[in-house]
Amino acid sequence: MKNKLIIGILALIVIACGLFFAFKALMKAGGEEVIVYENKVVETIDAQLKDLPMDSIRAKHALIMEKSIDDIQSSIKKGELTYTELTAFYLDRIKSLDKATKGINSVVEINPNAIALAKKMDAEKPSVSSPMYGIPVLLKDNINTKDMPTSGGTFALKGFTPSANAAMVNTLISNNAIILGKANLSELANFFDIGMPSGYSSKLGQTHNPFDPLRISPQGSSSGSGAAVAANFCSVAIGTETTGSIVAPANAQSLVGFKPTKGLVSTEGVLPLSSTMDVVGPMAKNVKDAIYLLNASIEDTSKHITITYSANDLTGKRIGVLKTTGSEKIVEALKKAGAIPVELPLDFNPDSVTIIYQDFKNDFAAYAEKCNAPIKSLPELVEYNKKDLDRRAKYGQGLLEEAAKMEKFDREKVNKIVQETQAYIKKIYEEHKLDAVVFANNEASSVPCIAGYPEITVPFGASENKEPFGATFFSLKNDDEKLANIAYAFEQSTNLRLIPEKYKEVIAK
């Protein structure tokens, strides 16, 4: 009898613990805490806006809010707007709406020279220039900049300023884009702890989704880049993707997110997670803007992408549709646009986590040595964080600790996973004579990410839960231009991008 009583009590304890952890999981899934750590964003903005006529600049909101790059450049060409006013407008919104109490908290650093650069663009204004001339861009805070810190979201690197820009930053600058600042990210590209919410970093705190800040996750790891574009804190932004880190925040915030073929944009000077999969790519409100930013990031101009399709050019295109929740809506939209959807089972799930564990430790050490970072290895970072876990690893650092312990590195195993994934894509392409493949949100993003193939998310309205929803297309290696055109045609035939209603005002009331 006594033994039965003890067993019964233990069973109740187990059930109670299970309910507790289930409740915790639900709470994390439903929203994130308001956490903002000390930063110098407002101070850096104030120093640049103090002598500018902000009332008259705010009055030009109709020329900027939700406008495409083509629209903005047209207004500037007509003399209705200047690059200085455009840059100041974004800085003002960041101060008022991103850094307000219970703000979005997407921006972690501001370029102290942003307004000076914009004034220079206004003074020079060549007759022929890149579409990105004078356009303010935010960079994810794992991309090296020599005039702002690059932290990867860590407390340990919060003040680390590299001596040189990442290669793609120099390419952007050579195309006369204005680097406005840095966007927050899920710490270390979301490979820190399984309990850490998307959009959280030990450097800045929690980034929120402007569509419903305390209910809908911003997704990650390019959380801040996505939130900032959606809330009109910049024209466009740069993210990075290992497995879903561009397309997930893009579909969660009704944006276009483009992960190009691996190698198309340089990753030199980008704090890595996996050299096998890491890619740099654009996030924007529409496909054309994403392509403008992508082209301005590609050093080899012969590989620039041109949009030639229209809404009617999906006619006859064979699009494989991986069956997932919500994919039936995509099938109907493709049929309506004249495409031929080919429904396919999602029966292939390649192992991206093994690749990350194989790559992360060595890749981080190589980056730290080359860039002279103050922390030289993952084991050193783990020990540094242990000295103040409440501040440096609020949600734990389980994934980081496991990666730091890795000793057995098997390149052949990694290559096998990549080859099997590429073979799967080749098989479905050849069997069904496909032009592209599409799936809902980021449900199958590991497939093109492991293969190193291009992938692009297009806004596709809302889910049944009234959350932004995306259609994510991918194609074969170096098929970026065809994929971009298919995505553009789909976008033009559907026009289902959503706007976060709470962030339509010019400044906080």
Image (tube, rainbow, N blue to C red):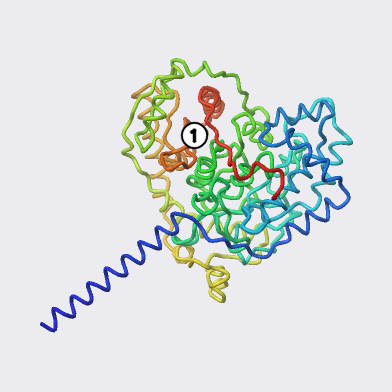
Task: Judge left or right: residue 61 versus residue 313.
Answer: right
Counting from the top left corner in percent of width and height, residue 327 is at 38, 33
Vertical side of 430 occupied by 277: above or below: below
Which image quadrant for residue 399?
bottom left
Q: Which amino acid does label 1 sit on?
A: Gly
Closer to us: 227 or 429? 227
Q: Foreground: 24 or 506?
A: 506
Secondary structure of residue under mark 1: strand
* Residue occupying the far left of the picture: 1
Query: Looking at the image, is 298 positioned above or below residue 163?
Result: above
The answer to whether residue 433 is left or right of residue 479 is left
**Outermost residue to the bottom:** 2
The residue positioned 54% from the left and 42% from the top of the image is 253
Q: Where is residue 256 in the image (x, y as percent from the top left)?
A: 56, 36
Residue located 73% across and 34% down the image: 62
Residue at the farthest front position = 509
x and y percent of residue 460 in the render?
A: 49, 33
Question: Is 142 above or below relative to 171?
Answer: below
Foreground residue among 248 and 34: 34
Instruction: Name the quadrant containing residue 435.
Output: top left
Residue 107 image position (x, y, % from top left): 66, 53
Which residue is disc 1 drawn over? 461
